[in-house]
Amino acid sequence: MTNRLTVASAKGGVGKTTVAINLAGALNHRDHDVLLVDMDPQGVATEGLGHAEAYDAEPPTLADTLLAGDRRHLAQDLLLDHPEMDLLPSNVDLLNTERDLTLSDVAADLQARGVDATSVIQSGTLLEDSCLDEDLPHARYQLDKVLREVEDDYDYVIVDSPPYYGEILDNCLYAAPNVVIPALAEGTSQRAVELLYDELDAMERETDVRCIPALAVANRIRASTNEAKEMLEWFDAAFAETPLIEIRERVALQYSFNAGRTLFEYEPGNDMTDRFTDAAKYVEDFFNE
Ligand SMILES: Nc1ncnc2c1ncn2[C@@H]1O[C@H](COP(=O)(O)OP(=O)(O)O)[C@@H](O)[C@H]1O
Ligand SMILES: [Mg+2]
C-alpha cells in the first residue's frame, strides 16, 4: 500500500506548504515516486509547483471527485507533472467544497436516522447518492476514496491541508492519518499544536482510524535567541515520542517556491536540504516500523 502523510496545522503561515513540497523533494531525491495532493482551497502548493493554470481550470476538478462517486475516477485525468513529483492540483472550486461537504454530512446524518434527505442531497452540488456508501455514509471519507483511484504508481502520497478545521481537513486526516506537524518557534504556535492534538483525538473517537504524529518540524528558527531556545525545549517536550527536525529561516525556501522548484533542485548546496533529507529518512523509518 502507498504510504500516505498529511502535513497539518490549523494555523496559516507556519510552513505546511513549504514542508510538504520540500519533503516531497527529499523523498524524490531518495528515489521514491511521490504524489503531492493540494487540498488547500487557496492552491498555494499548486501555484508553487508551477501549475497556477490548473487552479483556475474549468470542471471537472478535484472538487467534483470529492463530491460525486461517479466522477471520482476522473482524478486520474487531473494528475500533473513536475520534475520532482506528480501533483493532484487544488482548484478555485474547492472554496465551495467545505460548505458542500458540511451540508452533505448533515444530509447523511439525517438519512442514517431514517429521515428522507434525498432532496437535500440533490439540491445543488451536494455529495451525490453514489458517495453515501451504506457502510461509510459521511462526508469525511471522500478523499480516501479519491486517493485509491490515483495512488497505485506512488511510494508516498503527501497531502497539503488547509489552515483551519473543517470537513476538508477531516478528509485529509482520515485519508492520511500519519501527520507531519510544522510549527513556528514562537508562542502562538503552541496553541495551534495543542488544538491539532485535540482534533486528532476527536478523529480517533469518531472513526476507526488511528492518527499518529510521524514528524514534527520546528520551522523558521532564527539564530539562537532566547525565545527560539525556549521554544525548542517546548518542542522537545511536546513531541517527546515524535522525531523532530529543525528548519532555519532561509530566503532560499521562498525563492525556490517562487521558481516552482524544491530546494533540492533550486539550491542543492543549501544546508536545509540536509534537514529535509533527515525528514525523509524519519518518514521512511516511520513506515518501515
Ligand atoms: N524556513 C523558512 N524560511 C524562510 N521562509 C519560510 C520558511 N518556511 C516558510 N517560509 C515562508 O513563509 C510563508 C508561509 O509558508 P507556507 O509554507 O506557505 O505556510 P502554510 O502552508 O502553513 O500557510 C511562505 O512565504 C514561505 O515561503
Ligand atoms: Mg499552505
Image (cartoon, rainbow, N blue to C red):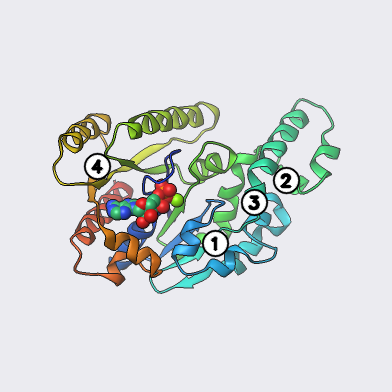
Query: Which kind of residue does numbered mark 2 sit on?
Result: Leu
Label count reads 4
Q: CA distance from mark 2 to mark 4?
A: 38 Å
Q: Nearer the viewer, residue 37 or 178?
A: 37
The quarter of the rendered structure image containing the N terminus is bottom left
Question: From the Cβ of disc 2, is ligand 2 less than 8 Å away?
Answer: no
Q: Residues within 10 Å of mark 2 (few under 14, many from 20)?
A: many
Locate residue 114, reporting x and y percent.
80, 27
Give the residue number, with chain letter if any, for mark 1: 89
Choose mark 1 or mark 2, whichever is in front. Answer: 1
**Closest to the observer, 173 or 131:** 173
Camera-near label (1 vs 3) is 1
Q: Is residue 156 left or right of residue 75?
A: left
**Front position in the image: 276 or 117:** 276
Q: Residue at x 76, y 49 (%)?
A: 125
Considering only order in the chain, which callout, 4 or 1, is on the residue closer to the N terminus? Answer: 1
Identify the residue at horizontal 60%, vertical 43% (top origin). Answer: 141
Q: CA distance from mark 1 to mark 4?
A: 29 Å
Among the two numbered marks 2 and 4 on one chain, the one whose residue lies closer to the N terminus? 2
Q: Which residue is mark 2?
A: 127
The residue identified by callout 4 is: 243
Is 139 above or below relative to 5?
above
Three-letter amino acid code of the residue under disc 3: Leu
Dot 3, how many residues are within 10 Å of its Cα: few (below 14), some (14-19), or many (20+)?
A: many
Q: Answer yes or no: disc 4 within 8 Å of ligand 1.
A: no
Quadrant showing the C terminus: top left
Q: Which residue is mark 3?
A: 66
Q: Secondary structure at mark 3?
A: helix
The amino acid sitting under disc 1 is: Pro
Which structural element holds mark 1? loop
Residue shown at 69%/50% (left/top)? 67
